[in-house]
Structures are given as structure tokens and as C-alpha cells.
Amino acid sequence: MRWDDLRQSTNIEDVRASTGGGGGAGLKLGLGGTLLALAASYFFGVDPRVIMGLMSAVPSQQAAPAAHYGTPQDQQGQFIAAVLGETEDAWSNIFQAQGWTYTPPKLVLYRNQMPSACGSANSAVGPFYCPLDRKIYLDLGFFQQLTNEFQAPGQFAEAYVLAHEVGHHVQNLLGIAGKVRAAQERASEAQANALSVKLELQADCFAGVWARNADETKHILEDGDVDSALRAAAAVGDDNLQKRAQGYVVPESFTHGTSAERTGWFKRGLQSGSIASCDTFSAPT
């Protein structure tokens, strides 16, 4: 991925220096959870109803860690800042074309654990977006896990992870997230899970929309980049995660979508570059 000349975002709170050592080690804990956790623990955050504010989320009482605000000084932090900056530029242009205003999220870089408005951010649950404070929480150690355990290395795989979480922020700004939350509150568990799948697949599609628009304006994609993102998307499909953990799948417990669905919706956004192509809620099951 070509990123050296991209604008680096300053909408970052870097608390890695004050939130523990050895980022990402706790990620393996997700495998021991429930089926719901299996679908969410390794990738893109916690129980979707926690992310959507459907479950009681009381902010932690521990003191907020000391933060460095602005672009990080290390190379990996600067890469993430460049990707975040490009999501800001691309989504600002997309929104402006519709007569809307894009307000970017904050990105919090941490190690191991820290408080958030949606409860405790923990490396065991992976990257996630909290709509209550409009922040993305990311332990960069997750990317080592993505490489070692899911065989999905590459900078564009990492960019896809962040772009997916930014996709959740876009859903929040467009009011989609709130509508899903209201529908899930009235739904059965199976129905709520199905709505969660549609929400997650739309975020995958939005990640593709970002990639298309960023490449058209900044030419960020290099050979192998799309395949890298597709490997990441396929690796964390609900069916693949459940097979890895227990040897069989339980479709009604899916919360993020199958490997085929995740890669398919990312490719749809990448091919179209349009928000309109990402209506997962009207698509056939």
C-alpha cells in the first residue's frame, strides 16, 4: 500500500505508554467465550449490542490514562494515522457530494485495556467503534495476531480493519446505527443477530467504498493489496471462526457474516465506490 505521502490525521489519542506493555497478548482469550463472542472476539470488537449501545454500558471508574494527542511518532502509528487521514479525506468528499458534512471519529491507540464510554476496551475483544463517544479503540498488537493466527498479513489488511471501524462511524452519522438499535430492542435474539450481520456487512462494504475513492484520488493500491484485504475478511467470517473454535457452525448465532459474505460486500463497495451499493438491509438473505 502506498501511504508515505498521505496526510496523517491528528485525530488520535495515543495512550499506549500508559496502558500496559506488550500490546495484543490478551487477544487469544476470545476463543474461550460463547458463540456470540466467537463471532466478535477476534475481529472488529465486542458483542454488537454492546457496540450499538444496546447493553448497559457504564463507563469504567478507573482514571483515564495519560494521552499523547496528535500524530504518533513511531512508524506503525504514523501508518495508521495516514490511513485514518485518508478515510477523513475520502469520506469528507463523499459526504460533500451528497450535501452532507462528515465529522471524523477519534482513534484511541492503547495497550491491553482502558476505559471507554461503551465499557472497558480490552485487547481480547479486538478493534471496535464506540458510538457513545464516537471513538475507535485499537490495540496495534492485533495486527500481529492477524498475521500469525489468521495468515492475513499486509498493510492493506490493516487498513481494511480500520476502514471497517470507520464504516461503523459512517453508519452512526447517517442514522443507520440508531435504526438498527431500535429494531434490535424489539427483536428476538436470532433476529437481532441477523440485523447485526447486515450492519457488519455494510461496514465491510463501506470499507470498500473508501478504498475505491482513496485509490481514485491518491492511487494508494499496489499489487496484492486487495487480495490482502480479502484474506483478512475471509479469515474472520463467522463460519470460519466457529469451525476453528468448535469444528462446526451455528448459522443462527452469526453476528458478522460468513467469509463469502464479508469478502463479497467489500468487493461490492470497492467496485462501485458508492454508498448506495451498500444497502445490505434490502438485499436477500
Image (cartoon, helix red, strand yellow):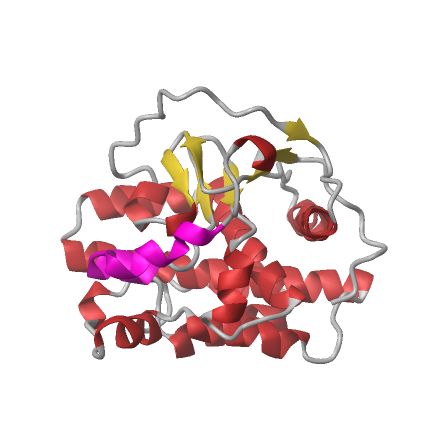
Q: How many marks?
A: 0
Q: Is residue 151 part of the magenta span, yes or no?
A: no
Residue at the image position 49 percent from the left and 62 percent from the top = 145
Give left or right: position of 164 versus 156: left
Give left or right: position of 118 versus 97: left
When asked about the image quadrant of residue 108, the answer is: top right
Q: Is residue 25 part of the magenta span, yes or no?
A: yes
Residue farthest right in this picture: 5
Viewer-closest of 243 and 10 = 243
State the image coordinates of residue 266 (x, y, percent, origin top left): 52, 70
Q: Is residue 267 visible?
A: no
Viewer-closest of 20 and 61 = 20
State the image coordinates of residue 210 (x, y, percent, origin top left): 64, 59
Instruction: State which region is magenta.
Output: 24-40
Q: Is residue 81 visible?
A: yes
Residue at the image position 32 percent from the left and 37 percent from the top = 53
Give left or right: position of 254 versus 2: left
State the image coordinates of residue 220 (x, y, percent, origin top left): 76, 65
Residue farthest left in this picture: 188
Residue at the image position 60 percent from the left and 75 percent from the top = 228
Relative to 266, does residue 247 appear above or below in the rendering? below
State the image coordinates of residue 164 (x, y, percent, origin top left): 52, 57
For the C terminus, the image quarter is bottom left
Relative to 83, does residue 252 appear above or below in the rendering? below
For the N terminus, the image quarter is bottom right
When asked about the image quadrant of residue 217, the answer is: bottom right
User: What secondary structure prevails in the magenta region?
Assistant: helix
Residue at the image position 19 percent from the left and 72 percent from the top = 250
